[in-house]
Image: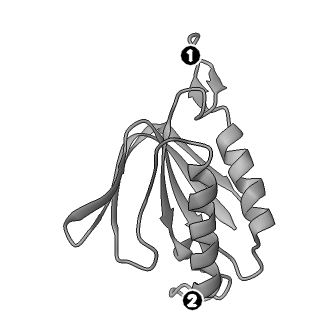
Amino acid sequence: MKFLIQRVTHAQVDIDGETVGKIAKGYLVLIGVGESDTREIADRLIRKMLSLRIFADENGKTNLSIRDVKGELLLVSQFTLYADCHKGNRPTFNGAGNPALAKDLYEYIIVECQKQLPVVQTGRFGADMQVSLVNDGPFTILLD
């Protein structure tokens, strides 16, 4: 499982010209699910993500978590995080989880995050989405 976390001042997901998810200050998280991933792995990554201290405190030090700053989450499924570009010029996605497993774990992650933060927005699993964001910093972290 991979979480690509981007600290943002705002982000949104549009599908066919309609905004389906939108946040202010917080994290845009692109989520990739691998074939051997489990809910236990998801729980570990969720705990780590919500505990990361990457927001500035009153002294400008990255010392505050998303909870501390009352940040928001925008969770977007993205199987392309499992792209393998070692051979040739066309990526393969053999490491990505099958769609049923990936959808189940993506929905599980959403529910678990909603239990811990008041604002959790999402994209739509399997949809062609347009994601826009202002990366704050820029600050991007890969958890896997």
* Distance between the alpha carbons at the discs numbered 1 and 2: 44 Å
Task: Determine which quarter of the picture holds residue 83.
Answer: bottom right
Q: Position of residue 22 (x, y in %)?
A: 34, 50
Question: Which residue occupies 58% across, 69% down?
Answer: 106
Residue reaching furthest to the top? 59
- Which secondary structure lies at badge 2? loop
State the quadrant of the C terminus. Answer: bottom right
Q: Is residue 11 above or below residue 63?
A: below
Specify whether 15 is left or right of 97. Answer: left
Which residue matches tag 2?
88
Pick whichever of labels 1 and 2 is earlier in the sequence: 1
How crowded pointer 1 is (Cα within 10 Å; few <14, some 14-19, many 20+) is rated as few
**Which amino acid is tagged 1?**
Gly
How crowded pointer 2 is (Cα within 10 Å; few <14, some 14-19, many 20+) is rated as few
Task: Determine which quarter of the picture holds residue 54.
Answer: top right
Question: Which residue occupies 60% across, 26% down?
Answer: 68
Which residue matches tag 1?
60
Q: Is residue 43 above or below residue 134?
A: below
- Which secondary structure lies at badge 1? loop
Residue reaching furthest to the front? 115
Question: Which residue occupies 53% across, 75% down?
Answer: 80
Residue 93 visible (yes or no): no
**Which amino acid is tagged 2?**
Gly
Work out whether residue 26 or residue 4 is closer to the camera in this orientation and state it: 26
Q: Which colour style is shown?
A: one colour
Q: Is residue 60 above or below residue 114?
A: above
Residue 139 visible (yes or no): yes
Question: Which residue occupies 37% across, 39% down?
Answer: 24
Q: Position of residue 133 (x, y in %)?
A: 36, 49
Work out whether residue 128 or residue 137 is closer to the camera in this orientation and state it: 128
State the quadrant of the N terminus. Answer: bottom right
Q: Are marks 1 and 2 in contact (CB under 8 Å)?
A: no
